[in-house]
């Protein structure tokens, strides 16, 4: 189903799937007299919450993204993310604000499976991208959110697009429910950027812990304090180092698991998670969880990785069939720690 927001006639739409019905329902909700809509958080860092968000702030967010990416009236967009979360809702709002033609595809691990024509704009999770490499060249501008983009996936994206001689521009996003999707983007392809660039009218700073503080008055009137450790340059760009609540303290040394995971994922294709498990002598023992079947070859590759510090090497490597994830695909570290630390 395609919804043309430049010539919207909801009564003429004939949804065939539950997801199409949900997208139409949200469109109707958007054009109602209510000044707010309800949005559910992902629950990746705690219990999922439901927020009441002002429509005008969602429009402001949509304008920032559309302007940054240069989206124009009449462009096509593809929604393949759950409409319950801010990521899905904002795809609809961007389409409404910029009068785009929105292609509605049921959220799945292969959202481009039935797409055969070029699409100007799309948002996907890393898992969806991983399963859509053969058709990425059909997307002109793609943003990836919901979880960090691994080094191995970045490499696959670059190799795939080089082979197809594609001009596709791909960005990793930074944001949260409270910022109404993202407030900064970092290009992955064709250029590989190290720092996120914040949108216009977004101010960034750090607190005494080195954690990112965001003031984006167009989308949230409050200063948002995150638990994300960052390095800021030029006042508008920042590099994500890791979440302070994920920091592992092993024998007095602070370890940022996200940085180690990025290093390991350059060498092996599997999903990996570093955890600090309670230990009497070290406080926390560094362990590496690898998704997939146990393999001596993988263990050998991990042991050969040139970790910067000796204490960055995992004390144990555990293989498991499936690493637990939240409903929108993020690794659920809390649940994983409970499973491992039994």
Image (cartoon, rainbow, N blue to C red):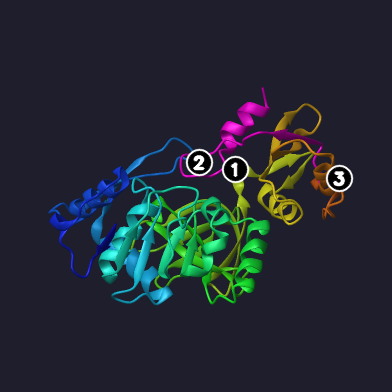
Check if residue 18 falls in the magenta segment: no
Residue lying farthest to the top in this orientation: 342
In the rendered image, which residue does mark 2 sit on? 45
In the rendered image, which residue does mark 3 sit on? 300
1 vs 3, front mark: 3
Where residue 35 sits in the image (x, y, percent)? 18, 54
Residue 284 visible, this angle? yes
Residue 214 or residue 114, whichever sits in front: 114
**Residue 139 circle label:** none
In the rendered image, which residue does mark 1 sit on? 245
Residue at image coords 30%, 59% = 92
Q: Secondary structure at mark 1?
A: helix
Where residue 212 sits in the image (x, y, percent)? 53, 58
Is the residue marked by circle 2 packed among few (<14), some (14-19), or many (20+) residues within 10 Å? some
Residue 222 or residue 307, whichever sits in front: 307
Q: CA distance from mark 1 to mark 3?
A: 30 Å
Residue 197 visible, this angle? no
Where residue 82 sits in the image (x, y, percent)? 38, 47
Tell me if label 1 and label 2 are in contact, CB under 8 Å: yes
Is the residue marked by circle 3 packed among few (<14), some (14-19), or many (20+) residues within 10 Å? few
Residue at image coords 62%, 66% = 160
């Amino acid at each position: 189903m395609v919804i043309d927001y430049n010539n919207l006639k909801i009564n003429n739409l004939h949804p065939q799937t539950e997801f199409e019905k949900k997208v139409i329902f949200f469109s109707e909700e958007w054009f109602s007299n209510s000044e707010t809509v309800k949005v559910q958080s992902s629950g990746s860092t705690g219990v999922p919450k439901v927020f009441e968000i002002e429509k005008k702030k969602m429009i402001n967010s949509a304008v920032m993204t559309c302007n940054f990416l240069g989206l124009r009236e009449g462009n096509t967009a593809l929604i393949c993310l759950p409409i319950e979360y801010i990521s899905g809702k904002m795809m609809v709002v961007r389409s409404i604000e910029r009068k785009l033609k929105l292609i509605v595809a049921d959220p799945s691990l292969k959202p481009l499976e039935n797409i055969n024509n070029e699409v100007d704009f799309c948002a996907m999770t890393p898992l969806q991208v991983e399963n859509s490499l053969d058709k990425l060249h059909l997307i002109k501008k793609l943003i990836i959110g919901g979880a960090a983009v691994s080094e191995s996936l970045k490499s696959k994206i670059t190799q795939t697009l080089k082979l197809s001689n594609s001009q596709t521009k791909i960005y990793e996003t930074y944001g949260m429910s409270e910022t109404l999707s993202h407030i900064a983007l970092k290009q992955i392809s064709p250029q590989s950027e190290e720092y996120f660039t914040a949108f216009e009218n977004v101010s960034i700073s750090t607190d005494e812990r080195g954690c990112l503080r965001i003031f984006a008055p167009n989308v949230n009137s409050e200063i948002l304090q995150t638990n994300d450790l960052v390095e800021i340059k030029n006042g508008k760009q920042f590099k994500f180092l890791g979440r302070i609540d994920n920091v592992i303290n092993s024998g007095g040394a602070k370890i940022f698991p996200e940085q180690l995971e990025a290093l390991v994922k350059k060498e092996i294709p599997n999903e990996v998670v570093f955890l600090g498990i309670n230990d009497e002598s070290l406080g926390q023992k560094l362990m590496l969880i690898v998704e997939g079947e146990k393999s001596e070859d993988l263990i050998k590759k991990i042991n050969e990785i040139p970790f910067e510090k000796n204490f960055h090497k995992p004390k144990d490597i555990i293989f498991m069939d499936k690493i637990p994830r939240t409903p929108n695909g993020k690794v659920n570290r809390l649940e994983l720690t409970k499973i491992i630390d039994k």
